[in-house]
Amino acid sequence: MPDYKEIRVNTVPAYTAAIGPGLLKDCGQRLRETIPPCHMAVVTDSTVGPLYLETVTESLKAAGYAASAYEFPAGEESKNVSTLSDILEFLAKERLTRSDCLVALGGGVAGDMAGFAAAVYLRGVRYVQMPTTLLSAVDSSVGGKTAINLQAGKNLAGAFLQPAAVLCGTDCLKTLPPEVFADGAAEAVKTGVLCDEGLFALFEDGTLKADPAEVIARCVEYKAGVVERDEKEQGERKLLNLGHTVGHAIEKCSGYTIPHGHAVAAGLAIIARAAGALGWTEEPIAARIGACLTKNALPVSTEFSPEALAEAALADKKRSGGSITLVVPKRIGLCELKTVPVTELLPVIRAGWEA
Ligand code: GLY
């Protein structure tokens, strides 16, 4: 029996995130444990499709599913209403029904878009997440956030829809380009700063001192608990946005040419420096966080001005009326939410900004 880690996510409905080698090859057999024979429409991108689509569709067919596939051009710039519309037209052309299922095969963009298509097609069908990047494995494949970007900002149209299953085949991680691996390391380091100094320490010398499956399991376990307690992000789940207020602003200012994890890394470094400068931390942590990110080939600053970042951030979902909720690191392993007037955002970014 392959060596899978399994984490139960007790939302309604509940599902299992399985992590381990061979899970793409075995996906059909594995999914038959929870999903009866139906039509599986796989949504993937032009990078992942040539690598894994055949493995996945063959496995699905061998397990008794019908399988079809839609491939879109890889990249954050595809995460828009036009690609969503193309996916929906594809599903309709394939005559998918409510007893059928989508499969999101790929990184965060494929997961977010296939998930959103599943949420709105026929007013909601099932979907399965098959993350192939470290970033989607440690974060975006779990928790049911789905979205597309609007011109006004990142993830501004979306829905909460929990997947029916998450199958994370860890063999995919071995062939990731270093900068794509680093992108996921940023989200794992973020999780370490949120809840687990030991996890953070695994990244500190820049050569991951653990099996990636172990890192993914620790991140997913923490996230599962948060999502179970606050699925719709009314409170505690906002903590998962550590580094994301400035991170999303960087992505938007760059026209989405800076990858998500790299932008989050710079956002994390900026909020850590701001927290130190403003006396919000329990101990000095900004230098340690910055050094860890740098060792993992991640940025700790941005060329965009504090003014540009503040303006972009104020279009973000994290704003509520006249205030915005920031996630502030207190020490490595503990963060808190701090709601400030929107007028405070620019001074906070200035306090942490470094050219
Ligand atoms: N990526 C943050 C969340 O799922 O809430």
Image (cartoon, rainbow, N blue to C red):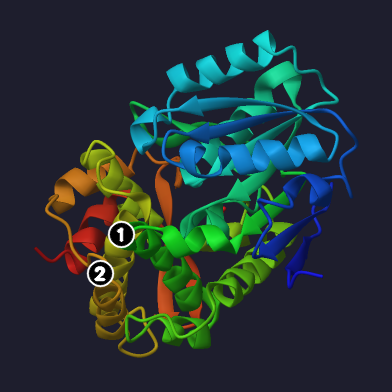
Task: Please state which of residues 1 and 216 is positioned toward the viewer in this rendering.
Answer: 1
Residue that appears at 46% across and 27% down: 72
Q: What's the residue type where badge 2 is placed?
A: Ala
Residue lying at the far left of the rendered structure: 355
The percent position of residue 222, horizontal first and vertical second, equals 64, 70
Left or right, 22 with respect to 153, comes to right
Residue 187 is at least partly visible in this image: yes
Q: Is mark 2 within 8 Å of ligand 1?
A: no
Where the N terminus falls, by quadrant?
bottom right
Mark carried by residue 202 = none
Residue 36, above or below 350: above
Residue that appears at 56% across and 24% down: 70
Left or right, 244 with respect to 213, comes to left
Disc 2 crowd, CA 10 A, few/some/many (<14, 14-19, 20+): some
Name the residue beneath numbered marker 1: 179
Where the C terminus falls, by quadrant?
bottom left
Task: Please state which of residues 244 and 3 is positioned toward the viewer in this rendering.
Answer: 3
- Label 1 element class: helix
Sequence-first disc among 1 and 2: 1
Q: Quadrant of residue 8?
A: bottom right
Residue 281, above or below 184: below
Name the residue beneath numbered marker 2: 297
- Label 2 element class: loop
Task: Please state which of residues 186 and 12 is positioned toward the viewer in this rendering.
Answer: 186
The percent position of residue 184, horizontal first and vertical second, equals 43, 62
Mark 1–mark 2 CB contact (< 8 Å): yes
Q: Is mark 1 within 8 Å of ligand 1?
A: no
Residue that appears at 56% across and 20% down: 87
Q: What's the residue type where badge 1 is placed?
A: Glu
Q: Distance from label 1 to label 2 (Cα)? A: 8 Å
Left or right, 168 with respect to 317, comes to right
Task: Please state which of residues 252 and 133 is positioned toward the viewer in this rendering.
Answer: 133
